Image (tube, coloured by chain):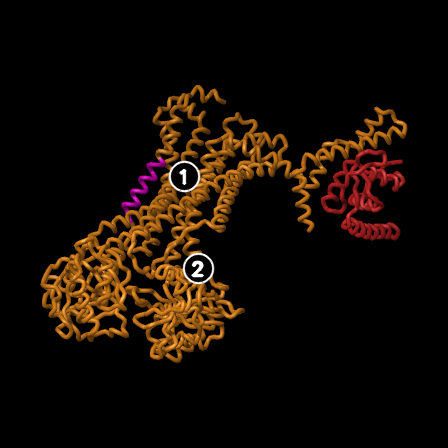
């Protein structure tokens, strides 16, 4: 209560300050009058009585002041002086104010925009009940291991195993489409503690084979497929041909793309008995809730103990297997998180540059004002008061800069959100969301505002007060005795300013190089020779469910029938099915050897991508046949194995002879299965996957290998987008329960991946240019200030016969020295940055001498310009004026 | 009679004690202390008013404008509940200290 009342007192006193003063006057006056009356009663003359009373009373104003002190009013008094004074000082130097405010706004704006982006992606809080108690196992696990962990642990209250299958979904009267699903144990929903938006979720009983014919929809999928129709709950749909009942819809916030990707539906896991014992392969994930008093490290210890026991019981598979726990949302997605943090670090360096600039500006300003400080100190202002004056000015600057920065963030968020949305809208017939596609919506919320506000105030205060502190160590005598326009800064103060500039230039070069790496990397990527035609190519994914197709004759019949159906579609020039497409990149790499060749020295056989394709594949993709022939109808199942290889592979295995008729196969020593090389084709590059593991490629006839997970490629004579629907109908005619998904033209896929690249690059370029401008401004400020301080020295030099060139060099030399230091440090930083970023994007970013050289020249050129302007002014110094000015 | 300076820290106690008898304005407080001490203690205005404002801010006393006995507008101070508690405390402390000082002076 008491502190509160004191506060009220003070606020009341502040508001009614005039009234309070008047009351104090009244009170004192009455006291005086009573004293005078008393003195007169004691026999003094009125005059005597008055003076005696005044004498004993003392100074009324001093007493009033001391009374006000008791209420902390002095503090308020002084503040009331400080604020208008600060405003006046800022108005008096509009150049300084504008530059400082803009610097802050830029730094705060860029950093908060990045922060708001991070908030929308990596730092978004989980929408679950008590998310801190949720842990997930890192990486994919084997079913038997997870079942043992679930049964034997003493630390988890709940434990849910998860799988990520995908299905063809269809209902009466609509073509099938592909959905990504989330198969979870019965514990899952109660563990997350989020109730469904509609209907109900499944329970442990429905997580049993035979009872599992239920499905829960995600909000996003419900809106997309069923337009948010609540009547869908209770109805039946077909998943891979099996009827299942829709029992519920989860709320919108339950979909968190950053953890598991966005999934369309939830199904019971209902683990099949014959996979329960599998320990050799892992593909499942698990999430668990800790018991109330159990910490993450205790849980990890318990899991470690179980892992050790499993290692003893199953030495063949589990001898060295460990399980790692991570907080849900924190453990995944590690790589992406790190990458975002790198980008944040780059944007934070803009704020750092802004800080250094601000510090420099304030330092220069406080130097110029050191006479003012000296005068005020001489007149009795305590040092604390001077500092508070500076603090007030800095705070005002930061608040204005911060508000501008937040406004900038708001605009940037609008633009970025719009561009992201546009990037996704360019894919109008994208039928089902790519499972890894995550939609981000940027928004300024309380946290972003708080972040912006705190960074603005912290920047303003720290970098406003520190130089002030330095400057307020004024030697009053020296400063006042000094002739005036040269309150000479000490050597250490100059060094501080120069260090700040060097640091700024260093950060700027790193920023420039970072932007340059991305821009040049993506440019080179776009200019690559692909080796196949990306225009007029429509692509889609298709999965033949194993339970209906098996992996033999039925699949082969499907390949053939689909090919025939598609050939009949007008506008289709050719079609092919394949294991992977160069649009998205190939998947499987095998170690390859030539039959009869000696095992490779060092033990490493060359790796090649293996891609089973139908016979029309090469023609449909527009590839070139270099030697021999491609697959024919005679290369069917049961016929001798054949292969088509790429040029580099041919040259590597048979350097000086024709590969045709030679045999090729897996590199393991007891391989008995060799394929005859019948043809050589050109190499292909991938549009999306910029860093292939190898450049060598090996094609097999799909008819001989079989395959259920396939890509469909259709070469069209018309715009490929127009054939999306006919293609879907063709598939439907072959099997109405089968869906194609990820329908896109090859060019769209490339554009989509290119668009996010473009957003990233342009953001980085914007940051780099801002950083460059800021440091140029900072350098200009320092050099211009140095020139101003040395005006009389330069005057003397000119008077003694120094040439124009000498003077210009005198000033330029100073700047060049700083620039060279900054460049040297920045080069080291840029080199390190390329190494770090290169680890994330090996095909795109590497040591790039061209970028480094370009950025260095740019930075050096800009610094020269920043120094040249003050140098020119120095050269124009009129010696007579300069010497007289003192 | 020679003026005697107040012991530091005792002014609050005296003011609180004098106000215990009822609301008084500043001049009256000074006069009452002067009179009750048989003209030994003189309260300087320069100390009195800051002390009054301090005690007000601490919530021991509260001011109220009213009419003085001669019809003048005056600011009267009265004890709050907290002020009464403070008076008891300070008084006990003073008694203990005075007794202790007396003991030392007598027995040394």
Q: In this view of the protein, which residue sits in the foreground, A294 or A131?
A: A131
Tell me the crowding category of disc 2: few under 14, some 14 to 19, or many 20 or more residues within 10 angstroms, Cα based: few
Q: A58 left or right of A514?
A: right
Q: Are marks 1 and 2 in contact (CB under 8 Å)?
A: no
Q: Residue at x 20, y 75 (%)?
A: A670
Horizontal and vertical percent for residue A421? 35, 51
Image position, residue A719 (x, y; %): 21, 53
Q: Which mark is residue A253?
A: 2
The image quadrant that residue A80 belongs to is: top right
Q: Secondary structure at mark 2?
A: helix
Magenta stretch encompasses residue A332: no
Q: Is residue A789 left or right of residue A75?
A: left
Per the rendering, the mark at residue B104 is none
- Observer able to see residue A499: no
Query: Could you tell me which residue is drawn at 12 percent across and 59 percent down?
Result: A625
Reading the image, the residue beneath label 1 is A774
| Residue A879, picture quadrant | top left
Part of the protein shown in magenta? A848-863
Q: Main secondary structure of the magenta part?
A: helix
The orange-coloured chain is labelled A
């Amino acid at each position: 209560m008491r502190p509160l009342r004191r506060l009220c007192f003070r606020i009341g006193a502040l508001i009614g300050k005039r009234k309070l003063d008047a009351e104090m006057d009244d009170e004192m006056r009455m006291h005086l009058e009573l004293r005078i009356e008393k003195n007169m009663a004691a026999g003094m003359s009125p005059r005597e009585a008055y003076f005696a009373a005044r004498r004993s009373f003392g100074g009324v104003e001093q007493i009033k002041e001391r009374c006000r002190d008791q209420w902390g009013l002095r503090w308020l008094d002084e503040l009331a002086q400080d604020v208008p004074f600060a405003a006046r000082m800022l108005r008096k130097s509009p150049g300084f104010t504008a530059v400082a405010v803009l610097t802050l706004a830029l730094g705060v704006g860029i950093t908060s925009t990045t922060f708001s982006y991070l908030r929308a992606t990596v730092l978004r809080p989980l929408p679950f009940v008590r998310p801190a108690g949720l842990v997930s196992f890192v990486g994919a696990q084997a079913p038997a291991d997870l079942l043992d962990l679930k049964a034997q642990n003493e630390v988890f209250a709940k434990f849910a195993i998860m799988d990520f299958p995908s299905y063809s979904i269809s209902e009466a009267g609509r073509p099938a489409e592909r959905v990504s699903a989330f198969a979870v144990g019965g514990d899952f929903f109660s563990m997350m503690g989020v109730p469904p938006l509609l209907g109900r979720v499944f329970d442990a009983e429905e997580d049993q084979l035979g009872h599992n014919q239920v499905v829960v929809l995600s909000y996003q999928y419900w809106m997309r497929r069923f337009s948010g129709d609540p009547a869908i709950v209770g109805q039946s749909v077909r998943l891979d041909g099996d009827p299942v009942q829709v029992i519920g819809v989860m709320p919108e916030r339950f979909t968190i793309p950053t953890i598991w990707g966005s999934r369309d539906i939830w199904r019971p896991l209902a683990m099949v008995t014959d996979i329960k014992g599998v320990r050799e392969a892992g593909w499942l994930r698990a999430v668990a809730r800790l018991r109330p008093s159990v910490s993450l490290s205790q849980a990890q210890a318990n899991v470690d103990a179980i892992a050790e026991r499993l290692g003893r019981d199953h030495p063949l598979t589990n001898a060295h297997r460990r399980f790692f726990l991570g907080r849900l949302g924190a453990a995944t997605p590690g790589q992406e998180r790190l990458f975002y943090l790198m980008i944040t670090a780059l944007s934070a360096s803009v704020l750092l540059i802004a800080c250094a600039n601000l510090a420099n500006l304030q330092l220069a300003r406080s130097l110029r004002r050191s006479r003012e400080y000296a005068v005020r100190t001489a007149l009795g202002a305590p040092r604390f008061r001077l500092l508070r004056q500076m603090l007030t000015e800095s705070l005002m600057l930061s608040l204005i800069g911060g508000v501008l920065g937040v406004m900038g963030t708001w605009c940037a968020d609008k633009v970025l959100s719009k561009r992201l949305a546009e990037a996704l809208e360019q894919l109008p017939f994208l039928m089902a969301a790519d499972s890894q596609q995550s939609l981000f919506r940027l928004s300024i919320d309380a946290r972003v505002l708080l972040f912006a506000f705190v960074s603005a105030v912290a920047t303003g205060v720290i970098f406003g007060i520190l130089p002030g502190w330095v400057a307020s160590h004024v030697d009053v005598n020296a400063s006042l005795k000094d002739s005036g326009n040269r309150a000479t800064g000490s050597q250490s103060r100059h060094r501080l300013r120069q260090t700040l500039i060097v640091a700024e230039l260093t950060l700027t070069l790193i920023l420039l190089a970072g932007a340059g790496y991305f821009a040049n990397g993506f440019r080179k990527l776009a200019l690559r020779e692909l080796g196949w035609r990306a225009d007029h190519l429509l692509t889609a994914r298709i999965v033949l469910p194993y339970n209906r197709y098996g992996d033999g004759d039925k699949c082969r019949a499907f390949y053939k029938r689909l090919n025939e159906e598609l050939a009949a579609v007008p506008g289709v020039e050719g079609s092919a099915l394949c294991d992977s497409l160069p649009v998205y990149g190939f998947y499987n790499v095998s170690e390859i050897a030539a039959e009869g060749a000696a095992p490779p020295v060092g033990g490493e056989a060359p790796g090649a991508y293996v891609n089973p394709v139908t016979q029309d594949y090469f023609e449909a993709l527009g590839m070139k046949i270099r030697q021999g022939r491609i697959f024919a109808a005679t290369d069917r199942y049961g016929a001798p194995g054949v292969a088509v290889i790429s040029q580099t592979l041919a040259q590597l295995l048979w350097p000086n002879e024709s590969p045709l008729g030679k045999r090729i196969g897996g590199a393991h020593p007891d391989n008995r299965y060799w394929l005859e090389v019948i043809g050589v084709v050109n190499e292909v590059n991938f549009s999306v996957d910029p860093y292939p593991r190898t450049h060598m490629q090996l094609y097999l006839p799909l008819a001989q290998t079989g395959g259920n997970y396939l890509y469909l490629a259709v070469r069209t004579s018309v715009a490929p987008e127009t054939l999306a629907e006919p293609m879907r109908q063709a598939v439907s005619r072959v099997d109405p329960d089968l869906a194609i998904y990820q329908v896109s033209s090859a060019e769209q896929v490339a554009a989509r991946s290119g668009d996010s690249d473009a957003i990233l690059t342009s953001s980085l370029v914007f940051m780099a240019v801002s950083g460059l401008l800021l440091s140029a401004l900072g350098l200009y400020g320092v050099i211009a200030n140095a020139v101003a301080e040395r005006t009389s020295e330069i005057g003397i030099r000119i008077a003694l016969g120094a040439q124009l060139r000498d003077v210009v060099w005198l000033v330029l030399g100073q700047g060049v020295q700083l620039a060279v230091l900054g460049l040297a440090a920045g080069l080291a930083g840029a080199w390190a940055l390329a190494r770090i970023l290169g680890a994330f994007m090996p095909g795109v970013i590497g040591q790039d001498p061209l970028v480094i050289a370009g950025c260095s020249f740019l930075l050096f050129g800009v610094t020269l310009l920043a120094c040249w302007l003050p140098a020119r002014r120095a050269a124009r110094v009129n010696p007579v004026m300069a010497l007289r000015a003192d | 009679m020679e003026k005697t300076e107040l012991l530091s820290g005792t002014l609050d106690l005296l003011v609180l004690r004098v106000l215990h008898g009822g609301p008084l304005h500043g001049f009256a407080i000074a006069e009452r202390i002067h009179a009750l001490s048989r003209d030994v203690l003189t309260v300087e205005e320069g100390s009195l008013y800051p002390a009054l404002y301090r005690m007000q801010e601490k919530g021991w006393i509260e001011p109220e404008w009213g009419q003085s006995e001669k019809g003048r507008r005056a600011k009267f101070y009265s004890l709050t509940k907290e002020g009464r508690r403070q008076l008891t405390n300070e008084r006990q402390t003073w008694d203990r200290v005075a007794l202790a000082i007396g003991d030392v002076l007598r027995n040394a």
